[in-house]
Image: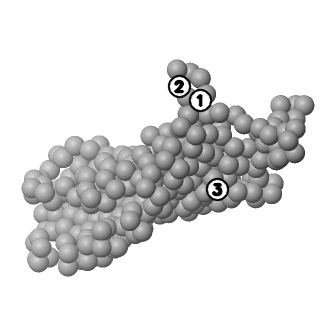
Amino acid sequence: MQSRSTGLKILFLHLAFALVLLSPPIQSQGREVLQRESKGASGDTTYNQTDGKGRKQGFWMKRYPNGQVAYRAQFRDDRPVGRTLRYNEKGILIADLYHTPAGQKTKAKIYDDAGKLIATGNYVNQRKDSVWTLLSNGRVVAREGYAQGEREGAWEYYSDEGQLAARERWRKGRLEGRQEKYYNSGALSSFWTAHDGLEDGPAATLYTSGRPKLTGQFAKGKREGVWLQHSVDGKSVDTLEYRRGELIRGTIQPNADSALNAMYKNAGKLREPTDPGESPRSGYPYR
């Protein structure tokens, strides 16, 4: 789907992102090692407090065993409000979250362990929502659409030169509609059509000139019917015929459909190690 370098960078960002947001609280042999702290009788600010119902209230802060602050957050009735900051064990900021007063929407900025921005986006009810942007060294490498934790809308991937490399379309967590891959020049390289996550509808690969190379149809995940194989100059056409995915007439030319095969086999494969929809609270740094 994407170039190898772009795909690897996006996968690395997802892995780093997961380590920041999707990991459980820091633990050692099953015990929480972040130290709970409070100040009270001296008149200093009191923090890490719960009410009679056991709900977090007010300012909370936890530390790593080495003394570095792990996070700072404000709570109201066990919900985060205002700004939450999370740090790594070296004291470098790795997550900056702003929660709306109702605590339902969160604007997030995620950083790697060197403090470089790698992702921005929103949570709604602690699930990814709207467009998330992934970055590498300040350059946008992907934009991903979500609706309440599910993939939704366009997912776009960019080459090292900043050109659009591929576009996926999603609906309720499944591929839906036209899926596209592009040459470095920006010209369309190939496309196929998805319905309910399966290849279903028109598909084609194209030469850099824009002329068709291979055209045909999918039906319920398999090639079906007549496919046309075009020469680079457009002067000759070979006819192929498929039945339920099996070639029953004609001979396909070497590499004629390699780009198309790679495109639909790799679509949607760069998933995060943990689905943000599986554990609504796992994406937050103060748990």
Q: Where, quadrant-wise, is the N terminus in this rendering?
A: bottom left
Residue at (31% x, 48% y) in the render: 265
Residue at screen point 24% across, 65% down:
205
In the image: residue 60, left or right of residue 115: right
Query: Mark 2 highlights which residue?
Result: 28
Give SS at disc 1.
loop
Question: Pointer 2: residues within 10 angstroms few (<14), some, or many (20+)?
Answer: few
Q: Name the side, left or right, on which 210 lies relative to 199.
A: left
The image quadrant where one finds the C terminus is: top right
Q: Residues within 10 Å of mark 1 (few under 14, many from 20)?
A: some
The amino acid on which the numbered mark 2 sits, given as a three-letter code, is: Ser
The vertical placement of 270 against 259, above or below, is: above
Residue 50 versus residue 276 in the image, above or below: above
What residue is shown with label 3? 97
Q: Is residue 238 left or right of residue 13?
A: left
Residue 173 percent across, percent down from the top left? 53, 48
- What kind of element bears circle 3? strand
In this rendering, is residue 30 above or below 34? Answer: above
Q: Earlier in the sequence, mark 3 or mark 2?
A: 2
Vertical order, 141 against 219 (above or below): below
Identify the image quadrant of residue 166.
bottom left
What residue is disc 1 on? Answer: 33
In the rendered image, residue 68, in percent from the top left (x then y), is placed at 57, 44
